[in-house]
Image (cartoon, rainbow, N blue to C red):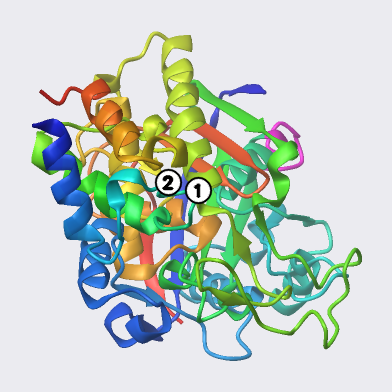
Amino acid sequence: MHFEFKNKKITGILTIVPKNTVKFDDEIENYNFTAKQSMKLKLVMGYDERRVATTGVCSSDLCEYGMNYLFDNNLLKKDEVDALIMVTQSPDYFMPATSCILHGKLGLKKETYCIDINQGCAGFIIGLIQAFMLLEQDTINKVVLLNADVLSPKISKKDRNSAPLAGDAASVTIIEKSEESSKIIADVNFDGSNALCLNIPAGGFRIPSTSETAIMKEDEAGNLRSLDNLVMKGDDVFNFVLNKVPEQIENLLHSENLSNDDIDYFICHQPNRFMLQKLADKLGVSYDKLPNNIVEHFGNASGVTIPTNISFNLKEQDRKLKVCLSGFGVGLTWASMILDLDVLKFNKLIEF
Amino acid sequence: MIREKVLEILMENRPDIENIENAELVNDGLLDSFDIVTLVTDLDKAFEINIDGADITPENFNTVDSIVELVKKNGAK
């Protein structure tokens, strides 16, 4: 699906990461790698440090902390929030929506429109599209997009496919109407036939969690996980990304007669360094222009890696940039967007 | 020459695999995705190539012959 928007812009991004840091070197014995392989994978995949929420901390706690930081520092006023979009795969409850929980905790006005979206690695772009559509309304001038996931409790420590990369984080993005009419373009695709390539099998209505679903079982690669844990078919996901994402980005560029040289930065979701380097190679862009350093510092916090990437790598931004955003993963979903990123009112990373 | 180098890299990465030349490395469960990632990195470096991400599939790493074909396809000389 192709989207085009005008007269909208991102005006602020705040990324919130847990203070708690977990180091790959301290976890090596969990993963059934040889010592030599561990050292190699550390370099190739970017395994190093990741931020993990402490027990009991939920996605909404990170969001609440971030929102209050903005209110307390006069970067956002409560009565300005016309819409609150919460993109998460780790809601507080099945019902009500976490955006409604936050609406109450933050004391937002009754007119604020609240909506939850269940999306992961493409969730920043999906959330931006939702925000831009809401801003078409005369009644909505400012949208707050929350991306947050605390999925680490659902990842088995003995699952080397997922555990060395798992991170928790949240972001608050402010999107507003703009006088500038530069075009924003996006393409979003889905492949539901492979929806279970990234999945938490039990815990929903289809397979409720029971003592049976909590039993840890070993797979053929020696990973230990239960049906209550996240499972990722890594090979399938890798192959899907390297086949579909470059094509989507190239098509988006061509649709506006743009080339790689017209883009200042390719800000992509960051599952691991190896995949990002192969993606950059395939697109023919330098690693400087397509940063791959988020996983090694923070881990992969699904939909929050793109805003983390912006807060971490573009914090010194002093001019308007043309950026290509790209997120890919659960769904399967792949989404890319090209837009101008003006100097932001705030662009910061804080610890919870 | 290419085959010898591929074998050397394979054996360096997985010295524990017996009869590597005749094995079905992926189908027999001898190589997993992490082995493939480290192999790709070593092959890229050794042959001064850049294996296309879309070519990093289990089939292309199932036998020594398929790996040799893969590196040739990606420019190894």
Tag 1–tag 2 contact (CB < 8 Å): yes
Label 2 marks a residue whose chain is B
Q: Taken as a whole, is the magenta stretch helix, strand or loop?
A: loop
- Region in magenta: A133-141
Label 1 marks a residue whose chain is B
Q: Which mark is residue B27?
A: 1
Q: Residue B24 carries which label?
A: 2
Residue A139, magenta (yes or no): yes
Residue A326 in the image: above or below residue A269? above
Residue at 44% x, 38% y is: B57
Q: How far apart are marks 1 and 2 (CA)?
A: 5 Å
Label 2 residue SS: loop
Q: What residue type is labelled 1?
A: Asn
Could you tell me which quadrant the N terminus of chain A lies in?
A: top right
Residue at 33% x, 81% y is: A28
Q: Percent from the top left, x then y, of residue A165? A: 42, 67
Label 1 residue SS: loop
Q: Percent from the top left, x then y, of residue A304? A: 50, 58
Lateral position of residue A87 relative to residue B20, left or right:
right
Q: Identify which residue, A175 or A155, lies in the foreground.
A: A155
- Furthest toward the right, the residue is A205
Residue A107 occupies quadrant: bottom right
Residue at 25% x, 32% y is: B68
Question: Are the numbered discs 1 and 2 placed on the same chain, yes or no?
Answer: yes
